[in-house]
Amino acid sequence: VEIQLTHNNNIGGVQYSVGGNFTYVRNRVVYIDEVPGLPDYQRAEGYPIGSFALYQANGIFKSLEEISNYPHVSGTVPGDIRLVDTNGDKVINNKDQVRIDKTNVPRIIYGINLGASYRNFDMTMLWQGQAQAAQYVLLESGSTGNFFASDVADRWSPQNPTGNWPRVADKMYTSLSGNAYPNTFWLRNTDFIRLKNVEIGYNLPATLVSKAKLGGVRVYANGFNILTLTNSANKNIDPEGDQQTATFYPQQRTLNLGVNVRF
């Protein structure tokens, strides 16, 4: 489904335009030759192409007592992610993974265009965004990379036993604990709306410009990627990124001042 609308009007000498576009795209697997006996909650049929099959995260183990009273994988210690025993067999294994009804390809993409002019002033603005998307992000760590400082601040440790992030470990993505099992703790909602660009301009009066024997002079200021509103978990990454390790090149914020001169 794709919709595009534009409205133009003039009120009290102010000319303005408002436009928008909206796209909704959904796909699903109709048939795929899957393993016989696969539980319904793991089957790819009926879900988007490329959907995630993940263990369900249910907080952080804070103590050895919690671990002993809850199903866990071998090697689990305080500070590891608690995984849900989906099928209730008291064992955490691949039968506990659950199919997620999202991928890193957004179902919804939209944009809003705004423009206005009054006398010698003009302004344009573009907002863009996406919705119903998710990205699995498990950063490199330890000997191969660094943690974000904001994540480390809330990690479990003997000194911070109430922390809500997993303990620090070398190479989190290959750890033998439950932290490295592909789970929803690392799945981020990447819905966002971004002020992609905005520009404000002023055309010098014709009487002033003509004295300099010029055709026109416009002074302007503009910016790109000014503001991004998204889930707080994405404050350190670009929600448009599509790599698990978040090593993609981020969007750059750019500010410009300029003058256009016509002869």
Image (cartoon, grey):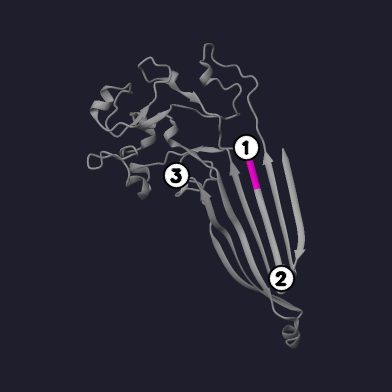
Of pointers 1 and 2, the one earlier in the residue sequence: 1
Q: Which residue is mark 2?
A: 118
Query: Does the magenta segment cover residue 108?
Result: yes
Which one is nearer the viewer's eye here, 211 or 205?
A: 205
- The quarter of the displayed image where residue 197 is located: bottom right
User: Most prominent secondary structure in the magenta stretch?
Assistant: strand
Q: Is residue 145 above or below residue 37?
A: below
Whether pointer 1 and pointer 2 mark residues with C-beta atoms closer than 8 Å, the reply is no
Kind of residue indicated by mark 3:
Ala
Q: Nearer the viewer, residue 206 or 168?
A: 206
What is the three-letter code of the residue carrying label 2?
Tyr
- Relative horizontal placement of residue 250, taking residue 120 as reference (left or right): left
Residue 23 visible in the shown view: yes
Q: Which mark is residue 107?
A: 1
* 41 is within the stretch colored magenta: no
Which residue was labeled with disc 3? Answer: 233
Q: Locate the N terminus by quadrant.
A: top right
Residue 106 appears left or right of 80 = right
Q: Which residues are magenta?
A: 106-110
* Dot 3: element: helix
Q: Is residue 199 above or below residue 141?
A: below
Q: Could you tell me if the residues under marks 3 and 2 are in contact, i.e. CB atoms within 8 Å?
A: no
Residue drawn 43% across and 28% down? 56
Considering every residue shown, the one lying at the far top of the view is 37
Where in the figure is residue 188, as x and y percent of width and height? 48, 39
